[in-house]
Image: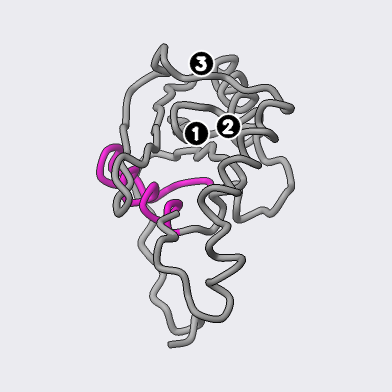
Amino acid sequence: MFGIFRKKKKVYGPPVYLSEPTILYHTRTEKVILEIIEEKLGSTNVILPSDYGIKDVSDKIRDVEYVVAVAIYGKFSSLVCKEVEKAKRFNKKIYTLDIASKKEDSITYYFEEGVPEHIEWLDPEETKKFFDEFLGEDFMGIAFRGFFLGYRKNKW
């Protein structure tokens, strides 16, 4: 009912830094990612950059055991690329969570140790182009129909 009455989840497990594209901040997908991290790495002790707004918190990577880098359709955004490079410099264990929509009603998540070879590393210009196409494809229904009527196809 009210957020102040919501029970806080107990924090446990090794510290994990979630490196995700900004378009996933505070979405249903982010919640699912946290559940996957809890299941696969046994941790709810996750540093979420989305909790800090647009402020750069990548320095916190030095204080974690694991970095989970999120790819959409096999592509790392330029921000995720920078954070993965930083994690490599700090010799952190990196996991990749690749998000791919295989069917209209579902999203498929692939969780792997390391960075698979098929992952494409985007520069800032490529990231902007990819996000523009991605947002146009997946969120246009919200903009036109969802405001007044609701939009059921929004799966992200």
> Callout 2: 10 Å neighbours few (<14), some, many (20+)?
many
Q: Would you say 42 lies left or right of 64 here?
A: left
Q: Quadrant of residue 26?
A: bottom right
Instruction: Give the percent coordinates (x, y) of residue 21.
Output: 58, 40
Identify which residue, 39 or 100, lies in the foreground: 100
Q: Would you say 12 lies left or right of 30 here?
A: left
Can residue 70 be spotted in the picture? Answer: no
Instruction: Give the percent coordinates (x, y) of residue 105.
Output: 30, 54
Residue identifier under label 2: 61
Magenta stretch encompasses residue 51: no
SS of the residue at dot 1?
Answer: loop
> Callout 1: 10 Å neighbours few (<14), some, many (20+)?
some
Can residue 37 be spotted in the picture? Answer: yes
SS of the residue at dot 3?
Answer: loop
Magenta range:
28-47
Residue identifier under label 1: 64
Instruction: Give the percent coordinates (x, y) of residue 129.
Output: 67, 33
Residue 91's disc is 3
Tell me which amino acid carries mark 3: Asn
Q: CA distance from mark 3 to mark 2?
A: 10 Å
Residue 92's disc is none
Tell me which amino acid carries mark 2: Ile
Please state, as top left, top right, bottom left or bottom right, where the N terminus lies in the image. bottom left
